[in-house]
Image: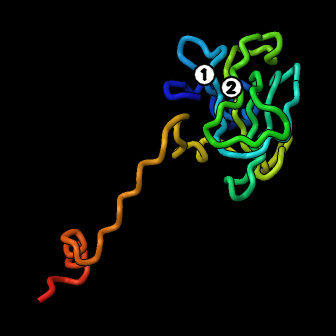
C-alpha cells in the first residue's frame, strides 16, 4: 500500500486465533475500502481465483529467480490485472475490496503472503513476508542515485588513499 498504511495483523502463531496467520494484513487509518494495492516485486499473474469463504478475490503473482523468486498472494482485493499479465514491482495490481459479502466476510484490508517458489497450502513453504518488505520502496519512490566513486588523483581519492596507505612522502 502507499505510505501511511498500517499493519493490522502480523504473521505467525496467534493464541486468540487458535492457529497461525499465514500473512500480513495491511489497512489504512480511517478505512481501507478502495485503497490501491501495489505489487511487492515483479512477476507474472498466475491465478486470479475467487474464494467465497476466505479471501474473496485474490491474486497469485509468481516471480522468477531474476525478479526475486517466490510466489506472492494478495487477498481480499478487487483485481486490476489478469492471469497472464506481467507486473513490475510497485505497479498497481488491485484495490482493497470494500464489500464484506464478496470479501470472505472480513473488514476491508489486503492480506499479503509469500510462498517459497510455489503456492503451499500449509507447511514450510509459507514464509513471513516481513523480512522481504524491510527495504521495500513505497509506490512511486526511486532508489537514490548512487554516490559516484572518487576519481584517481582527485582530492577525494587522495584522502581515501591516505587513510588506507598512509601519507605519501
Circle 2 SS class: strand
List x then y, in percent, for residue 97: 73, 17
- What residue appears at the point 55 percent right and 28 percent down from the top-left corner? 2
Circle 1 SS class: strand
Tell me the number on the disc at residue 27: 1
The quarter in which the C terminus is drawn is bottom left
Furthest-left residue in this view: 169
- What residue appears at the point 67 percent right and 53 percent down from the top-left corner? 68
User: In the visual, does 100 lie left or right of 153?
Assistant: right
| Residue placed most toward the observer, 44 or 55 | 44
Its colouring scheme is rainbow
| Residue placed most toward the observer, 126 or 166 | 166
Q: Is residue 76 above or below residue 114?
A: above
Q: Is residue 20 at all visible to an observer of this figure?
A: no
List x then y, in percent, for residue 133: 58, 42
Residue 16 image-quadrant placement: top right
User: In the visual, does 111 lie left or right of 156?
Assistant: right
The quarter in which the N terminus is drawn is top right
How packed mark 1 is, by other alpha carbons closer than 10 Å (few <14, some 14-19, many 20 or more), is many
On the image, numbered disc 2 is attached to which residue?
A: 110
List x then y, in percent, for residue 152: 28, 77
Total numbered circles: 2
Of callouts 1 and 2, the N-terminal one: 1
Amino acid at each position: 500500500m502507499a505510505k501511511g498504511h498500517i499493519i493490522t495483523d502480523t504473521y505467525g502463531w496467534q493464541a486468540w486465533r487458535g492457529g497461525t496467520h499465514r500473512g500480513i494484513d495491511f489497512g489504512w487509518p480511517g478505512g481501507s475500502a478502495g485503497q490501491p494495492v501495489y505489487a511487492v516485486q515483479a512477476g507474472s499473474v498466475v491465478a486470479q481465483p475467487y474464494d467465497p469463504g476466505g479471501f474473496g478475490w485474490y491474486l497469485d503473482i509468481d516471480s522468477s529467480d531474476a525478479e526475486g523468486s517466490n510466489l506472492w498472494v494478495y487477498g481480499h482485493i478487487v483485481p486490476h490485472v489478469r492471469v497472464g499479465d506481467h507486473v513490475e514491482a510497485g505497479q498497481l495490481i488491485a484495490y482493497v475490496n470494500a464489500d464484506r459479502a464478496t470479501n470472505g466476510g472480513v473488514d476491508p484490508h489486503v492480506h499479503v503472503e509469500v510462498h517459497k517458489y510455489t503456492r503451499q497450502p500449509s507447511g514450510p513453504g509459507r514464509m513471513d513476508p516481513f523480512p522481504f518488505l524491510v527495504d521495500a520502496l513505497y509506490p512511486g519512490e526511486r532508489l537514490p542515485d548512487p554516490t559516484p566513486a572518487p576519481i584517481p588523483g582527485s582530492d577525494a581519492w587522495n584522502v581515501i588513499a591516505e587513510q588506507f596507505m598512509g601519507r605519501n612522502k
